[in-house]
Image (cartoon, helix red, strand yellow):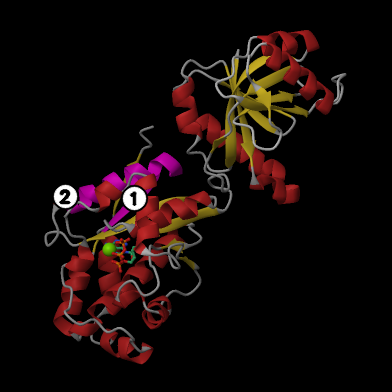
Amino acid sequence: MKAVLLRFGELFLKGENRHLFEMALFNNIKKKLQGEKFKLSKTQGRLMVTEFDNVDRIVEKLTTVFGLHSLSIADELEAKEEAIYDYCKGIKLQEQTFKVDVNRGDKRFPIKSMDLASELGEIILQNNEGASVDLYNPKQKVMVDIRANGKAYIYDEIISCQGGLPLGTSGKALLLLSGGIDSPVAGYMMAKRGLKLEALHFHSYPYTSPEAKQKVVSLAEKLTYYNDEIKLHCISFTKVQEAIHKNCLPEFMITIMRRIMMRIAERICKRDGLGAIVTGESLGQVASQTMQSMTVTENVVQKTPIFRPCIGMDKEEIISIAKKIDTFETSILPYEDCCTVFLPKNPVIKPKLFQAENEEKKLDLESLIDEALASEEVMIIKSNV
Ligand code: ATP
Ligand code: MG
């Protein structure tokens, strides 16, 4: 019988919370495999999937579950010497050099790991002409894992998974999701650290097209692959932008817009019990992402941390993650998001707080924010995998 063995990495570090993390991981896996035929079980701190129909689909789905470090597709046999010997007699190596690794998770098994490994090595050598053992640099490995459930698992490959922490174990946060390349990547990175995300998008309809909004829905859909379903809050930013455009100095347009976005984001966080704001900002990438700009922007956020996982990354690094998580092609579709509509030619690069505050005095901030919040539409983007 085939089994998929699952290993969890960092969870070992979590001391007393460990069982909570394990339980979250267990439930997240069950949810991810919904719709498949499978059985999920746990032995000795290792999870195992058995009784499935389609191993490729199972593996593909499992490699998107945060908290899993690696997995192996194994043959499951009785943990009896004879059964293991018989199995090894049938192994046909694909490579010339090999090594047998034995992990005796069940110490009741009568033969010590090293002894069993060399016996199995002998058997494999007898049945594979021209093969030789290389303990240090083998081209192929035969790995044998003997577990306390009375079974032995034999496999030749360890497939890397996402790592990170199980989704939801770090709490919930609000991702500011534009139509660009960076914010979906930021969302993926924070989800990987166990944050369950909701998303907030500001649109400027009718200055921006319905396609621009659809693009954001598509990006949120892509993120559900890692984040389960996503609650997407869409807010009209049109009135805010028009008011800033009409009343404030053009070079402060973006600074003020970003301060208002952050205020709205924090209101939603407080209202909906979300513990942090996540953005795709990267230091120095554009005028609004200098240290001074970020200081002036985050000054309006009172009690909510802002996570910016892309802060130290180059565009190329961000793009390579965007390609890996399949958001890149959608992000580069040409539709404009709200920030580009009223873009000034020369945005201030090093704004001062008092200057931003002076510009904002020209606005009726509270009613602009209330009106924006009143335009909120909420969509539940279901996971389509
Ligand atoms: P991105 O590629 O994520 O759009 P960017 O490099 O274009 O980022 P900005 O446009 O300055 O940078 O936006 C910085 C961050 O602010 C974005 O990563 C996103 O988190 C947030 N943001 C920008 N525009 C919007 C929007 N229309 N709705 C929601 N969040 C936004
Ligand atoms: Mg952008």
**Residue 83 coordinates in the image, percent (x, y):** 73, 9
**Nearer to us in this view, 76 or 89:** 89
Q: Residue furthest front?
A: 130
Q: Which residue is mark 2?
A: 211
**Nearer to us in this view, 318 or 89:** 89
The amino acid type of the residue labelled 1 equals Leu
Q: Secondary structure at mark 2?
A: helix
Q: Residue at x 31, y 73 (%)?
A: 258
**Residue 3 coordinates in the image, percent (x, y):** 60, 20
Q: Is residue 382 magenta?
A: no
Q: Residue at x 52, y 43 (%)?
A: 162
Q: For mark 2, does the 10 Å Cα neighbourhood hold few (<14), some (14 to 19), or many (20 or more) residues? A: some
* Quarter of the image where one finds residue 77: top right
**Residue 340 coordinates in the image, percent (x, y):** 19, 67
Viewed as shown, does residue 53 lie left or right of 185?
Answer: right
**Residue 174 coordinates in the image, percent (x, y):** 42, 57
- Look at the image and tell me in which quarter the C terminus lies: top left
Q: For mark 1, does the 10 Å Cα neighbourhood hold few (<14), some (14 to 19), or many (20 or more) residues? A: many
Q: Residue at x 45, y 31 (%)?
A: 60
Range shown magenta: 212-235
* Mark 1 or 2, nearer chain start: 2
